[in-house]
Image (spheres, coloured by chain):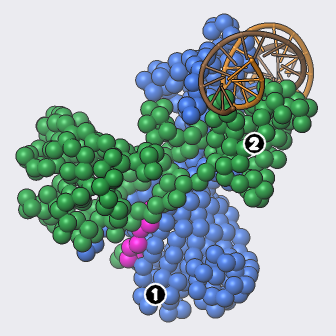
Chain colours: A blue, B green, C brown, D orange
Amino acid sequence: MSPEPQTGPASRIADDFRTAIKDGRLHPGDKLPTVRDLADQYGVTRNTASKAVSILRSEGLIVTRYGSGAYVRQSHPIRTLGPDRYARSKWQTTTVDAHTEDGRETIQQDGDQTQDVRRVPADEEVAAALGIPLGATVVERARTVRRDGEATHTVTSYYRLEDVEGTPIEDDRPGMAGRRGSFAILSERGLEPHDVRENLKARMPSVDEAETLKLPPGEPVVEMIRWTRTADGRVIEYAKGVHAASRFEWSFPFLIPD
Amino acid sequence: MSPEPQTGPASRIADDFRTAIKDGRLHPGDKLPTVRDLADQYGVTRNTASKAVSILRSEGLIVTRYGSGAYVRQSHPIRTLGPDRYARSKWQTTTVDAHTEDGRETIQQDGDQTQDVRRVPADEEVAAALGIPLGATVVERARTVRRDGEATHTVTSYYRLEDVEGTPIEDDRPGMAGRRGSFAILSERGLEPHDVRENLKARMPSVDEAETLKLPPGEPVVEMIRWTRTADGRVIEYAKGVHAASRFEWSFPFLIPD
DNA sequence: TAGTGGTCTAGACCACTTC
DNA sequence: AAGTGGTCTAGACCACTAA
């Protein structure tokens, strides 16, 4: 049952550095001794010292750079996601540069996300979410959002073809139809977003996800599923996102229901 | 930068079983070959075969039982947490067995959580949340909630002493003051819960958390922070929870703000 | 080119489970 | 007692980084 019943030298070495990091004796960015040095200092083989390093890495406490060394992990600034980011005031008036999810609206932001718009047949999940027949054509917009040059999350949105056909949402150029933009566009078509449901689940990333988000081993992701509806209950957007866990926090205020 | 630039035999073996599991050729509970068999079949040393197994384990795909074998991981039923679980109808009428968070109200549930109530001085975080001076006495109620005998999450609630002094909330017996109970009790004191804010963040567990929740290596946790307030904005409960990620999903519906 | 992280073989021992 | 997972030493080689 217990995963590590034996506490050998590798665990002990990892313990030492774990507490050193948590106690602040080692700061983000600091370099750890080389595995060869560790082996000498602790009187173990390089193999064992390497294992100690890999334990810390799997815990997300350090990152290792091939051929360079092991470093205490830098913690990124955390962005808090709440209902406010969907506020009407943020997309209703502004029609230009409506392409980022946070408050920044600089031109440079244009390079901060890639975009890929296609028409695809709806699979079972998308069909059920949008309330359309299986296989019906939908518009899929896949984005990878970056911050400071590093990917923070991916979002893939699905729209009914009839809702977005011929609109800038189908424009492939990045920045032409971010979420704020898409809300404004849907509103102009008489499909004003009224309510949202977000489902959140944390898990370890798949191999692909770890690669595209460049996640260090041991970093979880949060899977977000979002339904956006009009006042009469019609789902106008179904979206799935994968967020690097260390970069986000979610915050939801609500009233006690009856 | 890249974590595994070299794809040796260990990675290849792990790949084989990862796809076998995802393709459904191996089912939850199925036993993997022993490391010795793997070593023979793939023509590698036991050490390397063992490493392949440890890769899969760190990904949360399998669990290993010491001296027994490696098994495809059983997935637990997922519980969805939404605002509904705080509904008035669930705590306002019933005053007895108000101690579990889900709909079950059997006597056996009593054993499903441990409880530990104490008076402690408020640290900076708790003081700020409850709006009281640093060091003021607060009531801390720490619970570990189990399901089918396994711990699923821990919740630690903090109340202002004046709010709960002498009430059943200070009763240490399990089941006397679960959250539903505490809401009813606070209501009777004229402190009816009106709104809630929940903050969520996913991360890897600490060593302690992994132990108390008996988390397999590679399973993340979700840290939940909750503020419960009355209609006039007074915080009557501040709570921190740690949830095993694989057992929960959160669901929040909300209106598009102006 | 030298230093560093990552992986592998070969052989051994220990800890735990199952019978 | 036999089987199984986990760890370790010893030595080697490969992949990548930095100067």
User: Does B252 lie within the magenta span?
Assistant: yes
Label 1 sits on a secondary structure element that is loop
Q: Residue at x 89, y 36 (%)?
A: B42
Query: How many other residues sit within 10 Å of disc 2, few (<14), some (14-19) or many (≥20)?
Result: some
**Which numbered tag is attached to residue A245?**
none
Query: How many other residues sit within 10 Å of disc 1, few (<14), some (14-19) or many (≥20)?
Result: few
Q: Does the rendering let one see residue A4?
A: yes
Q: Residue at x 73, y 12 (%)?
A: A45
**Residue beneath label 1, please?**
A233
Q: Is residue A35 above or below residue B186?
A: above
Label 2 sits on a secondary structure element that is loop
Q: Residue at x 45, y 27 (%)?
A: A22
Q: Is residue A86 above or below residue B143?
A: below
**Which numbered tag is attached to residue B32?**
2
Q: Residue at x 63, y 69 (%)?
A: A156
Q: Chain of mark 1?
A: A
The span shown in magenta is: B250-256
